[in-house]
Amino acid sequence: MAIDTLSPQPPSKPEPVIADPSRRNPARWLVVATPYLWLLLFFAAPFIIIFKISLSDTAIAMPPYTPVFEGFGKFGEFFSQLDFENYEFLASDSLYIKSYLNSLRIAAISTFLLLLVGYPMALAMARAKTSLRPILVMMVILPFWTSFLIRVYAWIGILKPEGLLTLLFQTVGLLGEGEQVQIFRTDYAVFIGIVYSYLPFMVLPLYAALEKMDHTLLEAASDLGCPPWKAFWRITFPLSLPGVIAGSLICFIPITGEFVIPDLLGGADTLMIGKTLWTEFFSSRDWPLASSIAVILLGVLVIPIVYFQNQQQKAG
Amino acid sequence: MAKSLGPVKRKFSPWTDPASVPFIRFENITKKFGNFTAVDNLTLDIYEREFFALLGPSGCGKTTLMRMLAGFEEPTEGRILLQGKDLAGVPPYRRPTNMMFQSYALFPHMTVEKNIAFGLEQDKLPKGEIEARVQEMLKLVKLEQFAKRKPSQLSGGQRQRVALARSLAKRPKVLLLDEPLGALDKKLREETQFELTDLQHTLGLTFLIVTHDQEEAMTVSDRIAVMDKGVIMQVATPAEIYEAPNSRYVADFIGDINIIEGNVVSNQGAATGGVMLDCDGLKIVVDQECPASTGDRVAFAIRPEKVRLNIDPPTETAVNAGAGEVYDIGYLGDFSLFLVKLDDGRIVRAAQANIQRLVDRPLTFGDRVWVNWSRDAGLVLTR
Amino acid sequence: MKNSRFDATVLTLGFAFLYIPIIILVIYSFNASRLVTVWGGFSLTWYREMWSNQGLMDAAWVTARVAVISATIATVLGTLAALTLVRFRKIPGRLLFSGMIYAPLVMPEVITGLSLLLLFVSLNVDRGFWTVIIAHTTFSMCYVAIVVQSRLLTFDRSLEEAALDLGCPPVKTFFRITLPLILPAVLAGWMLAFTLSLDDLVIASFNTGPGATTLPIKIYSQVRLGVTPEINAICTILIGLVALGVIAASIATKRNEVRRQRDEQAAAAG
């Protein structure tokens, strides 16, 4: 359709037009390759090694395991040396199975408790005045910036039998003289510690989901004759589900492998797999066994982790 | 609408001169994004010092075409020539084109002055020359007293002028304007349109503008390319586009128009007897040279302001006329648009200038009226 | 109205739950008595004790250096990773890459710590200062990547195109246009990486070696022996430092906000 007149002729003022040789920019590859290689080396490769070591024998030498194979040339040898002894041991000793199950149980209950505590907070924040919201968000984030260890430690002084909770209950008369709160070094203390430590991780995704919700939806529901409590379950909650899922995953996965909280607040009978792994590694110095514990933990968590990644990728 | 025909232009029409050499040439350009073809085997010439508009709805490929000239996209097929040189592989920062972005894209962390100087600094010009050029640009867009301000401290119209100054500072061979006035309110937009044409005339540069606003395209440009789905439908001056659209698409896209489908009864050329159409009983004769032959299905197109409206039956009622009643009236201030429902059910739109200050309309809903038009008022469209 | 009373109660209780343990810890760091339940009067004894505890001070110095170095490397790597995620969507193995960014955010620390240790051992790297830095960099760069990514997603690409269009080559465009504009997010990422490193016990425990005992490892070993007011003192100082940093950051943000609003008013006025 164009008005085509003549084939191009030499221009009146020729201008040197230089083709750029760096169109496939090397800088571009530097940007991609640097973090990529770093993560491959320091995040992905270790998983292959941990898997390998979980299949080797314990030795007293340093490093305390016998290498399964040296170099990639000895694949045949590698397979002949494969040794599922550690996994057989894990399956035979009920301590480990109990640890896994108990970790999952504690993580599930804690996640539910976190939702129970976190949802009303997130909802209240989302319903607060717009000018107030950034301050509230800041107040939820602030404890996150202070050390995890310090926050767990703070609860020891409160929960221990001769601690502040006992003092408080004695003062208000809930407990008699000489009686003590018997929470410290039980599962209850672990729940309190987990809910306390992970609360910001639950509240923030919930708040993010609730905050961007269109307020007029509830007005429309009300206009159509839906009472507020029903509107909550039929409008607000379903729309906040992405936040519920994100918050639950962000809490559930790391809680399952939690070490510090059960170690400092839990009792001897609080079996959690992170603690078991730690003991095998640091006390028994059984690295191959610790590795197989980690491999199985990873196996248990791989579905929620992949699900989490998918959610994040969709959001990104 | 007729009012958007724009100011009378200087006598400038290199495209009619077979000896002139195109300044920019898009040669069989195709651009695909995955399976989507944004631009489809498009060829277009633009001449030096021309103010050229790419006009079309969003998604028609006009912005893609401009971004290929700027170097942000590479054509999938075809070549782009600037003064005869192939631009393939030349990155945007080495092209002698500059662009004014739809969002203005002013650097928020730099002052007005620094924004305008940015491009000149890339050329490593001496400091004094940069300063002089920045002052000249500030004067050109009348923003001298705002030199030290940050973009956030400017109004929308001022930002638009900074963006213009920044893109002109390097004296580009081609200035690309991507929906440059879209963010301004109507009044400011109209003022700025005239400023742009003045500026282009004074500086003697080639301007390429992308817009979806037909009034804007008609006001500022020497020629317009109307685009749809990656192809060019028509390239012509604003007046030609309005008065002689080459297709139903262009006719419908620019301004308001009545389109009546019909069959060719006879075609004897403009001088001898015109084209005669039978549109389901309505007889239409048009004095026009037209490639259609007898029996072809074509469309008759006529602008509402060229349809005459009468309370009394016209003397000649055999052709180019119909009777009906007023179906709806739209009062638009400067004129009123009457929707007339003909006796066969067809609706014809007729515009009447409001010459007198009429509060009580002489015509009202349901009134019996006659419409007619002269033989040279409308157009037969074959595609 | 019923809603607002409910909300106020929920928020009061929630924040009380979040803050009271920390406040108690701070108060008791000034307690002259060694016992938690007995208030023995105001005293700075524990701060003096802390100051003279050479082991604790050494650990604090190690931690400070680890945190600064790892946060800086993590910020560079995390920013590059964010650019990769947002800008180069078609790279091979993109799914693997984004997986490696998101997984460390939820990966139990015992797994990350142990697996990285085994890598160092199999590469015959002596564990110590630098292995802790590598470990911290690896997980905190992912947090930086997330923070910077969310800024880049809202970044107006036409600003970069404008710079290219005006003759500025891509790398220079990044340093003159992109980086200055995403700098607040990059700095926030640095602060996050810094506190994550300051905080970490588990991963550091696995990857540390002789002479590289970090503060959390030191605190943990003392805490296992019971509550010691010295620890309260150092915790209070850490909390104070973080609070100071956060308050300074929010004041800076607030001032920017005020300036922006003033600018907009000035612009509206002509």
Image (cartoon, rainbow, N blue to C red):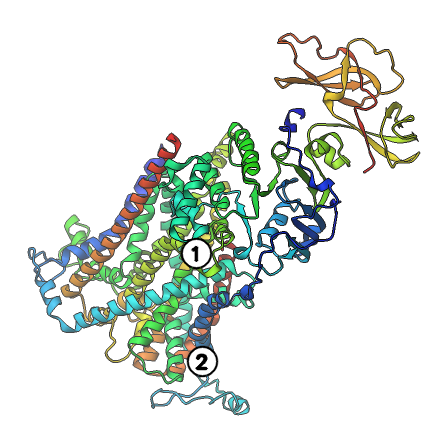
Q: Give the CA separation, mark 1 to mark 2.
A: 54 Å
Residue B131 screen position, x and y as percent: 39, 46
| Near-viewer residue (B109 or A74) | B109
Residue C219's disc is none
Of residue C207 and residue A285, the one placed in the foreground of this image is: C207
Q: Relative to residue A100, is residue B146 depicted above or below? A: above
Does C147 appear above or below A270?
above
* In the depicted structure, whether residue C133 falls above or below residue B19: below
- Pointer 1: residues within 10 angstroms few (<14), some, or many (20+)? few
Q: Mark 1 and 2 residues: CB-CB less than 8 Å, in contact?
A: no
Position of the N terminus of chain A, as image quadrant, is top right
- Residue A124 seen in the current view: yes
SS class, disc 1: loop
Q: Check chain identity for marks 1 and 2: say if they share one.
A: no
Q: Residue at x 17, y 73 (%)?
A: C55
Residue B190 position by quadrant: top right
Query: Could you tell whether A173 is left or right of A71 in the image?
Result: left
Where is residue A255, by image quadrant? bottom left
Circle 1 chain: B
Left or right of A216, for residue C263 = left
Whole-percent x, y for residue B338 in the image: 71, 18
Give percent across and percent down for residue B231: 72, 46
| Parent chain of label 2 | A
Which residue is denoted by mark 1 in the rendering? B124
Query: Which residue does the image show at 77% across and 9% down from the upper left?
Result: B311
| Kind of residue at disc 2 | Ile
Q: Secondary structure at mark 2?
A: helix
Dot 2 alpha-carbon crowd within 10 angstroms: few under 14, some 14 to 19, many 20 or more: some
Query: Dot 2 corresponds to which residue?
Result: A49
Q: Three-letter amino acid code at disc 1? A: Lys
Residue C78: x and y in percent read: 41, 63
